[in-house]
Image (cartoon, rainbow, N blue to C red):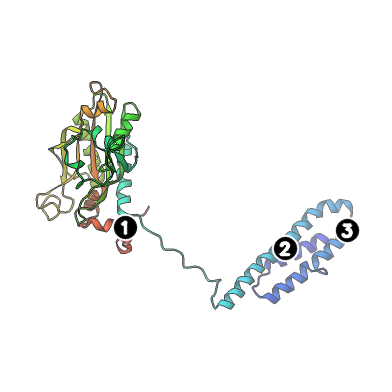
Amino acid sequence: MLQEKITQYTEEINAFSTVIVDELEQFRIKFLGTKGIIKDIFDEFKSVSPEEKRTLGKVLNEFKQLAEAKYQSLKEGTEVAETSKDSGLDMTLPGEGFEIGSRHPLALVRREIVEIFNKLGFVVAEGPEIEDDWHNFSALNFPEEHPARDMQDTFFIRKGGEHGDIALRTHTSSVQVRMMEAGKPPFRAIMPGRVYRNEAISARAHCFFHQVEGLYVDESVSFADLKQTLFYFVQELYGEGTKVRFRPSYFPFTEPSAEMDISCTICKGAGCQLCKYSGWVEILGCGMVDPNVLENCGIDSKKYSGFAFGMGIERIANLKFEIKDLRLFSENDARFLKQYKSALI
């Protein structure tokens, strides 16, 4: 008999639902009051046999907990409803939700570059943005009279000192130096990060921008390894139909050095304003690591060789998204950033 009552009242409790205060109070009095159903059932429980107590005891406690939990849950709902009534707002309506943001186009390009080189075994290395003269210039074979050391090209923080001038790094090649000083070959890493140059801000230039530089040092590394690595990178980034060419160039820390062009992604090589009607666009500089740089970092240049390359992420993003003004990347204009919401992963 007692078991049947508990089953009946359990079904009633589960079916009860209201946000009206008076109805909820009636529920409390009926089940949880001093003269309520639970009180009566517990009184009746005292007279059952010891065998039944062992069976019904747990069931009765669960029944009481169910009634208390139901009351507490409905009470919170009625409080919300009353608050809504007082404020003139219906708090029971579903929320509008938050608008999903979008990744910055530079972050999208940076991630894609990292993923491509990860497939080739390159790891990511990082270093400080405030650098000393040794890591930013001297170890990389920059002569004392090099223009990059001038005030009009570099943001110097402090002149002189134990480790030379202190400045905002002008390239992430300084991370390569730190990596080679701290370890032993082989090295295979890329160095993404922000760099600074003392330049006038315009649609084509900025006083800060972002680079990804790469370094591979091991025994018997050749220029052919460099070309194949960069060719694979371009095919993965821009598509298999993208053409590549290398032009001789000069950088203090590589010898021989080259600049790499790709067929224009806008006009497909036919000629347009972006490629200055040449059909080609420069995207990066590269070359074999100068033996002096290896020796400066404590690496035997007769045993080891390597290649290095560097590119501006803004330039890659310009070609990928057809963005013509570099200033858009740093203005945080929501209208500009929302265009890349579809690229959010």
* Callout 2 crowding tier (Cα within 10 Å): few <14, some 14–19, many ≥20: some
Label 2 close to label 3 by CB (< 8 Å)? no
Question: Looking at this view, is 140 or 73 the one in front?
Answer: 140
The mark lying in front, picked from 3 and 1, is: 1
Depth check: give the residue in front, 23 or 85. Answer: 85
Q: Is residue 90 above or below residue 116?
A: below
- Residue at 32%, 37% in the rendered image: 119
Q: CA distance from mark 2 to mark 1?
A: 51 Å
* Tag shown at residue 86: none
* 259 relative to 224, above or below: below
Q: Which element carries disc 3, helix, strand or loop?
A: loop
Pointer 3 with pointer 1, Cβ within 8 A: no
- Label 2 amino acid? Glu
Mark found first going from the N terminus, 2 or 3:
3
Tag 2, which secondary structure?
helix
Q: Against 230, is 205 above or below?
A: below
Position in image of residue 176 (x %, y %): 29, 35
Q: Position of residue 297 (x, y in %)?
A: 28, 28
**Disc 2 target residue:** 68
Q: Amino acid at mark 1?
A: Tyr
Q: CA distance from mark 3 to mark 1?
A: 70 Å
What label does residue 46 carry, if any?
3
**Residue tagged by mark 1?**
340
Residue displayed at 26% across by 58% down: 328
Q: Quadrant of residue 62?
A: bottom right
